[in-house]
Image (spheres, helix red, strand yellow):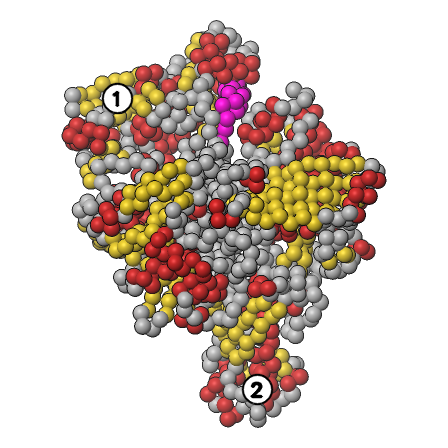
Amino acid sequence: MADQIPLSMTVNGRTRRGLGEPRLTLADFLREQALCTGVHLGCEHGVCGSCTVMMDGQAVRSCLLFAVQADGADITTVEGLAPDEETLHPVQEAFRDCHGLQCGFCTPGFVISVAAFLEANPDPSDEEIRHGISGNLCRCTGYQGIVAATRQAAAVMKGNEQS
Amino acid sequence: MKPAPFEYHAPETVADVVGLLAEHGDDAKPLAGGQSLVPLLAMRLTRFEHIVDLNRVDELFGVSADNGGVRTGAMTRQAAVETDAAVADRVPLLHLATPHIGHFQIRNRGTIGGSIAHADPASEYPAVMLALDGVAEIASTSGTREVPAAEFFESTFMTAVAPDELLVALRFSAWDQPAGFAFDEIARRSGDFALAGAAVGIGTDADGRINRAAVGMLGVGPIPLRASSVEAALLGLAASEADPAEIGRLAADDMDPIGDVHASVDYRLQAGSTLVGRVLAEALAQVSTEAGNG
Amino acid sequence: MSQSAAAARYVGQSVKRLEDPRLVTGHGRYVDDIVLPGMLHAAFGRSDLARATITRLDTVEAEALDGVYAVYTGADLNSYNDSLRASLHSPESPAPPANMLAEGDVRFVGDPYVMVVAESRYIAEDALDLVEVEFEPLEAVVDYEIAAESEHHVHPELGGNLAHDLPVPNPATDEAFENAAHTITETWHQHRQTNVPMETRGIVASWQPHAGVMEVWASTQSPHELQLVGARVLGIGEHKMVVHFGDVGGGFGQKMFLGREDMAVLVVAKLLGSPVKWIEDRRENLLASNHARIEQMTVKMAVGEDGSFLAADLDQLEDDGAYPLGGPATPGAMATMLYPGPYRMGPVSWRARTVYTNTCGRGAYRGPWQMESVAREQMIDRVAREIGMDPLELRRRNVLRPEDLPYQVSTGLHFETTISPEQTLEQAAEMIGYDDFRAEQAAAREQGRYLGLGMALYIEPTSMGMGPLGTESAMLRVEVDGHVNVFMGTGSHGQSLETTIAQLVADELGVRPEDVTLHQGHGSGYGFGTGGSRSAVIAGSAARAAASGVRDKVVAIAAHLMEASADDLEVADGVISVKGTPAASMTMAQVAATAYQNSDALPPGTEAGLEHTARYKAPPSTHSNACHICTCELDPGTGKVTLLRYVVSEDCGVLINPMVVDGQIAGGVVQGIGGVLYEHAVYDESGNPLASTFLDYLLPTAAEVPDLECGHVVVPSDTPGGHKGTGEGGAIGAPPAIFNAVADALAPFGVYPNRQPLDPNAVLSLIASSPNS
């Protein structure tokens, strides 16, 4: 067994320290040591997007990174988006309003992906939305509610920016 | 689905990387964006005793101007290539091909060098590199050498980069104007690897006669391929008069496809050459417009 | 329709889901989120060969690895064999040997033959690499079409590969065929697909020695099936089997029953005395959980000059794989029985067979007998082409009209007056703009563009009331502070029951939905769980009855305390008031506090407390119906099909939560899109699976899916509340509608597809085979 390496990163604004073999994936570190169980493992080979998190401001598959690679990085998981317990992030609110989730398993990855997508494309067309979110798989909703939620979140976030 | 153990190295210079590769040879593997390598490790379809992480080697990152063209460090993220103004301006084909790679989350990590060194015959950058006669800069403890695209791809997933070598950069030259470029592929779903794809560049003289034609193909052979029959047929024609569908059909002669679960050999030959014709049409239309504007 | 006591205040509203705040913020609790002190991790070693004898199996090196606690083979675990039977599987019917781990031989790629328990999943997988195993390959039975005749037997114990053969001849069809103007025959094929819940299967089991209690957390649709079968496997009573139900990431039928791995984890947790977790990885899920839809139906139809359906003869064959999940089943019998669907069909004869092969076992997948709609609706389009009639017109001539109801189907089914196939057909045709599309299609064909339209009309038996499926219970308790806990045997895994049950209870009891919490799993009364489109009708009716029982008591107590007549009181949003005099009121909390803490103040003879348990027994079947119509464009150069529009008109009776209903339809439709155009769990001829990752098993993404337009026809059912099941319908109607659309787009080429998937490769091959080319 390879040696355990000390790890330290910022997760949702707090420093999280841990210890892991080099092969420990970032997803497993976040779930097991940073206690962010909202990071879901749907395929562990980089296709389904359920484990998507923000690393230094960019949406990435946390199953395709080793925790040691994220040493010193700034990570945001789905748990870190809502400003407080009474308030949801506009993307989260939109997913609820538009029935963008059923079983909820893919949802954390979608929420992060949509938040990142809208940051880069604040005013997307429907076609851009459909392609923009095509890196995440959902088996329950048929994507209808997710597309609608992305539309709503775009409108709300744009409004927030203007006000 | 958890990877087997390995020893992790995070060098910060190319010199250190090639030193580690020289020391460990076949037992070591450079880790670039990890979007192809890590799934293989997780499924234990491949394993290495030493993983040499390139993500902290600053000198491997970035796009720079190079003799009118561009030089992209091997670790330049695909997302950075996608939005780079010099790339869009000087090497439009690279710019056009990039959004076809996976999804934006993949492109945030995936690198141009990783993609080219992995050399999946169905992936985008190798075909673009081949079409554009790009040049690979390859380093080892004995120095740096250059390999042109035509000699780079040896067989499926095998390139001119030896186990003790590192792909450090790719160079692409700009084309004379007027020129038109187009890229497209047939994929089962948004973001999937291509069943067949084409990267086309067409250049003409002042009279609108084609004096340069480059057609790279992906997904239709064990390695990325040039459609030389198509290129030969195009040279000397007036861009506005070439019949792309007719000429595109010649591409089948240059293909050497393999059948798999997603598409048969026949499918790739037939749909692939149809696609070449369509992409050709787009590039021809563009070069005609360019010529008209100029 | 039975009228419910209370006015609908929340039922019928798209109430925002009570589940969502935790789920959108990552605070759901799925089985992999459960961590217990001392918990160990299991991993299974699985066969790479479809059929082989195990000639050597040595686990010494694996056991010696640091961090490994135990390694088990079939010989260690299979003594529990007798107890693995699922609830729906009769002990009398022949079945494959029930083993947790393959012993002596392996029977499909993915067959587990060794199990490692270690301190982490990483180490468990390291140990699997150290297991030394040798196989002697045997010829595998892969093609189900010839499995019955094969000299090689998937299960030598059974002496043959034919699992079931149910012939139901009907001499009345002979005459119909003799006199028919047209007799048309085709064999329709579906192909191997799999459920693919985004959360794979998983279980955590923790044995409490001396207490004799097994505590379990699992990703399940049916906590009581787990409690019942788990207890049987362990040889303990159900009162010692504690099943916790948390969030479940989808199932679509896959999590109704225990898998062999689930049972092995239960047994091993007891043997080791340490908590054991097994989380299936995606490759295991694609290879070895369950597959479905590997079937074909040969249909011969007698059709009159005017297009009337006179008779049908059906021959259904389905692949059960090696170890069908939940035991061998006979969905083919249902598929043939349901074939007449929403049409006047005349006599039907049929035969349904199931065979074993050396492939992943069959299991229930959303609409497990939807082959009836696939074969019938594709056949109707074929008939229309053969006799030169528009497919909508042909359906109009044969569809069951209101005046035909009630209708006795020749296969034994009975349709009550509460179905509406004709109405949904017409609504869907109007939504899609049928005539306009036909004009657009004709114009497009002039320009060399190929558009197609497909439709499918069906009746779905939901909420079936027989055997273990027949009932659900609800235990409802108003707590001292007036909030409500409901305990039910359901297993909501995306169906939104926490919200919809709360809506029903809110109306019936007179509280707000957010005042109601649904508890599933431990502490609830027996029920079959969530699947089979059964929760709205069966669980919903139980919840209504429990709430109604408590409401009566609330009103009686309040009337006594307020010195008012019970008939003058109304209860809404947690307030009991005198009708017309809102100032005269008291709260649910005041009533509850009296019931529990001041019981001397209760009306004479009233039992203290505010709780009620009710169990609902469902009628044999509650039928919902729908019509799907979609349009597509086919690219003849690449064979790619793009869906343009998709409309559904559905009658699921009274909608509890329209947003949730539309969501269920959409999810099912997109599974149908996946099935026809993208997904294929294909094997090569040696039985090697070729789609064992998400790179090869292609779920549709948002980019492959059009906007879905839903219309509703509401004919209430005869059950309390007037609801009908709606969970599976989308996946029943979509495959034939999409198939028919592609076939329609291909019509100018003169080719007739009869099998899925219609992927680009298949479409281009069809075009290449065109007699016109």
Secondary structure beneath dot 1 equals strand
Taking C627 as reference, is B288 left or right? left
Look at the magenta stretch and give its main secondary structure: helix
Which amino acid type is shown beneath numbered disc 2? Ile
Please give left or right for residue B228 compared with residue C752 in the image: left
Residue A61 makes an appearance in the image: no
Q: Residue C734, located in which quarter of the rendered image?
A: top right
Q: Which chain hosts label 1?
A: B
Whole-percent x and y of residue C544? 60, 71
Quarter of the image with the C terminus of chain C in it = top right
| Residue at the spot 40% in from the left edge and 64% down from the top edge | C234
Q: Is residue C603 above or below residue C679?
A: below
Image coords of residue C532 (percent x, y): 58, 57
Q: Position of residue C95 (x, y in %)?
A: 52, 53
The answer to if C372 sits in the magenta stretch is no
The quarter of the picture where residue C244 lies is: bottom left
**Do the residues at pointers 2 and 1 share their chain?**
no
User: Where the N terminus of chain C falls, by quadrant?
Assistant: bottom right
Q: In this rendering, is residue C561 above or below C218? A: below
Magenta extent = B262-280
Residue type (three-letter) at the residue carrying disc 1: Glu
Q: Is residue C471 above or below residue A130?
A: below
Q: Which of the numbered marks, if any, corresponds to residue C557?
A: 2
| In front of the other: C561 or B162 | B162
Q: Which residue is mark 1?
A: B137
Q: Is residue C159 visible?
A: yes
Q: Which mark is residue A92?
A: none
Identify the residue shown where x is 46% and y is 63%.
C229
